[in-house]
Amino acid sequence: MTNHIHHDLDHTQSRFRLLLTFLLNVLITLFEIIGGFISGSISLISDAVHNFSDAFSIIISYIAISFSNKPYTVKYTFGFKRAEIIAAIINGSTLSIINFFLIKEAIQRILTPPEKVDGAVMFWVALAGLIVNTAATLLLKKDSKSNLNIKSTYLHLLGDAITSAAVIIGSVFIMFFDIYWLDPVITLIISIYIFKETYKIIKESTEILMMFAPADIDLNKVKELVEKVPGVLNIHHIHIWRLNDKNIHFEAHIDVDDMLLSKTTNIQRDIEDQLRNIFQITHITLQFESNTCINKELVINQQTL
């Protein structure tokens, strides 16, 4: 009960931080769009577009957290735990699409540099953007370490903070050296960096939805560990997957001797303790049997059953 209350409190605090971050992003988006058009800077406009996508990302994350906190029912026996994973994919995909168009525009501007960009306006607007984006990033930093959904939003914000810093540097060069081509170059570099970061989020989220085994768990080591438990003859038909970025589910068949089949409580407890402590598996289902399955491969193809 205490853990459940703590979990609900964490979600409430996360939602509050997301809402505060949303308000900050809406304000800076409007400010940067106006500043971008006044100065003629594509990097400022790209930063504004990123901030707008951040606001969208935050709303998606907020809704996902609200859904993921709903209780299990007889129809939804897993609840809505994967709502946050779907949100991470939506956020990552949206940012990738936006980056694609910004890269395209940046390349066009590199080939045909703008005649004039107001570096002073760029500087002050980008400075305001840096302050707001840094504050928003710090608001979500703690939650991003343990939640893939919020991490996707955090990366949006971190990318914007880096963008604002790069725009400030670029504006200084434009003000003092009239290097106008630097503006689209900054946009290009930042967009490529964000592409790289969002790819990781999309890849991990897709692996969770496809029920891939966690990359850091070696099933051969699981087999070796379990078969060392006294009374266990064999482990087979393993299925292991992540429900979301926190919960790992595991199920398997455990072969024991005929004489031990009615005394599996201790064996089960030993196996579960090992899997939880060493592999951080959170949900374990074991089927005990005595030489029932003909095929005893570690992982079995369903078509052979």
Image (spheres, helix red, strand yellow):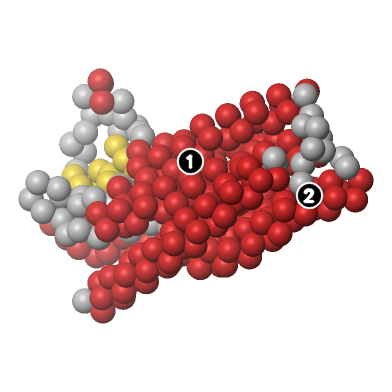
Q: Residue furthest bottom?
A: 2
Q: Residue at x 76, y 46 (%)?
A: 118
Q: Looking at the image, is 127 positioned above or below residue 32?
A: below
| Amino acid on which the number 1 mark rests in the picture | Gly
Q: Which mark is residue 92?
A: 1
Q: Which mark is residue 119?
A: 2
**Residue 193, image x and y in percent?**
66, 41
Crowd rating for badge 2 (residues with CA inside 10 Å; few <14, some 14–19, many 20+): many
Say what secondary structure mark 1 lies in.
helix
Q: Nearer the viewer, residue 60 or 238?
A: 60
Could you tell me if residue 219 is visible in this image?
no
Task: Pick the quarter of the image with the C terminus.
Answer: top left
Q: Nearer the viewer, mark 1 or mark 2?
A: 2
- State the separation of the CA atoms marked 1 and 2: 31 Å
User: Image quadrant of residue 274?
Assistant: bottom left
Position of 249 with respect to 94 (left or right) is: left
